[in-house]
Amino acid sequence: MTVRPILQLGDPALRVVAEPVDPTQIASPEVQQLVDDLIETMRDANGAGLAATQIGVHRRVVVMEVADNPRYPYKPRLPLTVAINPVIEPTADEMVVINEGCLSVPVRGDVPRHVHVRVRYLDRDGAEHDEVVRGLTAGTWQHECDHLDGVLIVDRADPASLSTWEEFDRHHRAAFVERITAFVERVGS
Ligand code: NI
């Protein structure tokens, strides 16, 4: 496992649409190494997710994980998930505005996300998954899959909501945590 540099906003490689992984190649050392590096890099950066695009690899692979984090008590736990060739599809019209950060973007912003989405993907063993996820977890899936299409939070965010992390903590965090905690209690997950 290797911690890889995370590309930053302005790097053209973040705008490339990633190619699917050939399912017959999932067991290959190349793909398995990519998965290991993504996990290691995400954990090293304390991120909730990371897409291969963010380390400059244009393959459709994302990893996600949310452990207990006292800094973000509103975030539901999400066990380590490796998704290869993920496809997401909203299953309802309901939207929620989530204040999101990104390891590739120096600011946070309010992004509208679908509350209920169906996700289909292959895991690192090549097994097929077909699940419905909701709430903040659904938001995380949409954020990571956006990266595979070269889309960043700054493209979707309300421009007036953009904030550095420091100013978010100072001016906006309390109200956001209050609103999103009530949302998580209502929607679950
Ligand atoms: Ni991101």
Image (cartoon, rainbow, N blue to C red):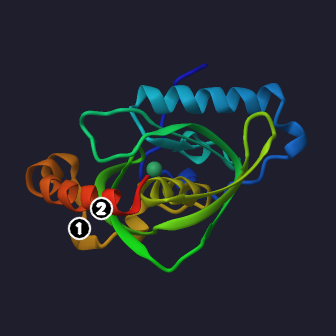
Residue at figure coordinates x 55%, y 55% from the top left: 147
Location of residue 1 with respect to 182 vertically, above or below: above
Residue at figure coordinates x 60%, y 27% from the top left: 37
Q: How many numbered marks are there?
A: 2
Disc 1 versus disc 2: distance between alpha carbons?
A: 5 Å
Residue at figure coordinates x 69%, y 50% from the top left: 60
- The residue nearer to you, when weighing 75 against 15, is 75
Location of residue 39 with respect to 179 vertically, above or below: above
Residue 66 place in picture, x, y as percent: 43, 38
Q: Quadrant of residue 28?
A: top right
Dot 1 falls on a residue whose secondary structure is helix
Label 1–label 2 contact, CB within 8 A: yes
Q: Is residue 163 left or right of residue 35?
A: left
Q: Is residue 127 visible?
A: yes
Crowd around label 1: few <14 · some 14–19 · many ≥20 (10 Å): some
Q: Which residue is tagged 1? A: 161
Q: Is residue 122 left or right of residue 69?
A: right
Residue 123 place in picture, x, y as percent: 72, 40
Q: Mark 2 belongs to which amino acid?
A: Gly
Residue 98 place in picture, x, y as percent: 34, 62
Q: Is residue 99 visible?
A: no
Q: Residue furthest top?
A: 1
Q: Which residue is tagged 2? A: 109
Residue 7 place in picture, x, y as percent: 48, 42
Q: Residue furthest left?
A: 170
